[in-house]
Image: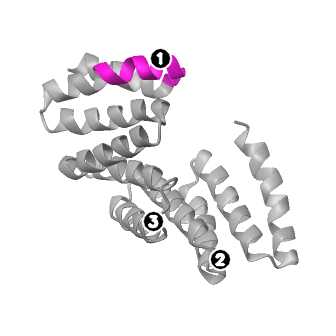
Amino acid sequence: QDYAEGLRYAGKALPLTYRLGDLSLQSDCERLVGLFHFRLSDYQKAIGHVSKSLELSKNNGDESSIGSSLNTLAGICLAAKQLEESENYILEAIRYCEEANDSNLLPIRYGMASEVYHAKGEDVRSLDYARRVYHIDLLLGKTARTGIRLSQMAAAQIALKQDAEAEHSITLAIPILEKAGNELPLSICRNQMGEL
């Protein structure tokens, strides 16, 4: 979690990747530098580096990396309150993921879409994506992740005044998150229950 030190090393690595001429390595390093800037709340630099990562991935034809860069850009734009851009990036990331039939990454994309639509106040869509990802994570046996998905569902349900459904989602989520030791989503769930 020492982002400044991580950025220092990634910044040293970046020019070396360009000397090697490996597009995949350049893309990965640009995205990493962007993520460090994001963690340090420098959204403009973060967007610049991750956009470069996206461009390199497209030049390389690496669809998995394209999807990762798009998802990262969606998250940065979400944090920067650039919600229209965030929506565009996540929908494009979902399209890449669905075309590649990538069941491992699709839940991550759907989860981000749920967050984006909740931030936009489009909670029917947010709930739809949260339900989709919840069922995918259940099928894949990712129990710890289902607690997070239930919390996402609850956020949309609370916004939609579906209090009984939200309480049910949170009641299911809390023991899952306690068992997983996932403190941040657990505290979110407890706040949600307090709000209800």
Amino acid type assigned to the residue bearing label 3 in the image:
Ala
User: Was residue 175 drawn as part of the magenta stretch in this picture?
Assistant: yes
Q: Residue at x 70, y 36 (%)?
A: 1
Q: In which quarter of the image is residue 50?
A: bottom right
Total count of labels? 3
Where is residue 27? Give x, y as percent.
69, 69
Please give the label number shown on residue 178.
1
Amino acid type assigned to the residue bearing label 1 in the image:
Glu
Taking 165 as reference, is 92 left or right? right
Q: Quadrant of residue 87?
A: bottom left
For marks 1 and 3, give the CA distance: 31 Å
User: Would you call the spot at circle 2 few (<14 residues within 10 Å), some (14-19), or many (20 or more)?
Assistant: many
Q: Mark 3 points at which residue?
A: 93
Q: Can residue 80 be seen in this view?
A: no
Q: Is residue 19 visible?
A: yes
Please give the label number shown on residue 31.
none
Amino acid type assigned to the residue bearing label 2 in the image:
Leu
Labels 2, 1: front one: 1
